Image (cartoon, rainbow, N blue to C red):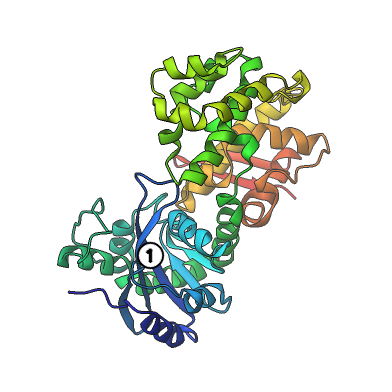
Amino acid sequence: MQIDITTNEALAEICASAENQPFITLDTEFIRERTYYPVLALIQVSWPGQGPLLIDPLKVTDWDPFHVLLKNTDIVKVLHSSRQDLEIFYNQMGSIPQPIFDTQIAASMCGLGDQISYAALISKTLGIQLRKGDSFTNWLQRPLTDAQIRYAQDDVRYLPDAYDKLVALAKSQGRLNWIREETAAQLTNDLFNPDPAGLWRKVKKVGQLKEKDLVVLQGLAIWRDQKARELDKPLRFVLSDEVMVELAKMDKLTLDQLKSRRGIHPKFVQRHGESLQETHARARDLPRSQWPKLKESKNRGPSDKAEALADLAWILIKEIAHKANMAPANIILKRDLAPFIDATLSGKDTTKFAISHGWRKEMVGSLLVSLMEGRMIIKVESQHITWEELT
């Protein structure tokens, strides 16, 4: 068994064949253990009437026809748990494909399970049990084994039929627009272009630091990310989180301290020590007004009335989610409920809450308004929660 597409001409040909399709399905295989950016090793694609085609990124050099296909807004791009695949395409094109239909998001919205695996999706939608394979394998080796090729093919072999099933189910439930809305909200270019000023929050054990040291960690985190991109190395290969926290605690950083620090190679200090030292010093000199905070200062908490209504509203939301076969947290996080109710009762702006928009508002919004205005009765009948809106 061999990879199907290994030349620019072959890729252009299949892209031309797909340009009038209503949708295409996509998957990727990549390696990123020793690099900052994922190293693309294989692309799988299929569409109605066309079985799996495997594209070899180690051979193809002209990606323009493929990118035109991905940017064609008349063609839906169907992927499962697509975030990492989209990162590949973002790195190639500077943007993610549009529009996207993520079958994992769709499955959760249709009541098939939250964070469902691809194998479980195919089982639930098509009744097919996929063969087990080893996903943690060297996709950069050539030639690929027959087992690798079969595994890769299966990742898109059944997606067209699963997509059709999900669309039909979503239409029958009146949730297709919900899925489109949620996918567009979750999968954006911003996922792959994070604010550098917030990178420090991802460092482990950040809670060990005093407020005056957080600003140093912030500077170090920005420096580390820039250096990792420049070297194309994982963050931990530049500086580990443990070292970052220890350096942030220091009032002043010297080259001798770097050389004696466990976890930092002498060659690293030789090449990057002065730059790291300057970054540390600049951050330490920043005024208190520019220091980041581990926890943003909070205003007055929700009122007692809002807290009480939130407890009651959570019962209602859980019952609605149960009937829809959805996780309540997909509608609203419990910790956000009391602040939302408090803002509503106080006549404040609630647009920052997702429940104020789109399908979430449609699903529970009017009910919550009735509850807050005292126009609802919640009761237990035959061991089930029921509710009635009063006119």
Say left or right for 33 vs 348. left
Which residue is nearer to you in this view: 383 or 216?
Answer: 216
Say left or right for 368 vs 325. right
Residue 6 in percent (x, y) is at: 31, 76
Residue 368 in percent (x, y) is at: 68, 44
Q: How many marks?
A: 1
Hey, which quadrant is residue 196 in on the image? top right
Residue at image position (67%, 27%) is 307
Residue 170 in percent (x, y) is at: 49, 67
Which residue is nearer to you in this view: 146 or 154?
Answer: 146
In the rendered view, tell whether residue 68 sits above or below residue 316: below
Residue 213 in percent (x, y) is at: 62, 17
Q: Examine the rendering and report whether any part of residue 294 can be seen.
A: no
Residue at image position (57%, 13%) is 250
Taking the view exactly as shown, the residue that stands out farthest to the front is 270
**Circle 1 residue:** 27
In the rendered view, tell whether residue 152 sits above or below residue 137: below
In the rendered view, tell whether residue 243 sits above or below residue 389: above
Say left or right for 152 vs 356. left
Placement of the N terminus among the 4 image quadrants: bottom left
Which residue is nearer to you in this view: 249 or 18?
Answer: 249
In the rendered view, tell whether residue 184 sits above or below residue 248: below
Residue at image position (47%, 44%) is 231
Taking the view exactly as shown, the residue that stands out farthest to the right is 347
Q: Is label 1 in a helix, a strand or a loop?
A: strand
Hey, which quadrant is residue 282 in on the image? top right
Q: Amino acid at mark 1?
A: Asp
Q: Examine the rendering and report whether any part of residue 356 can be seen.
A: yes
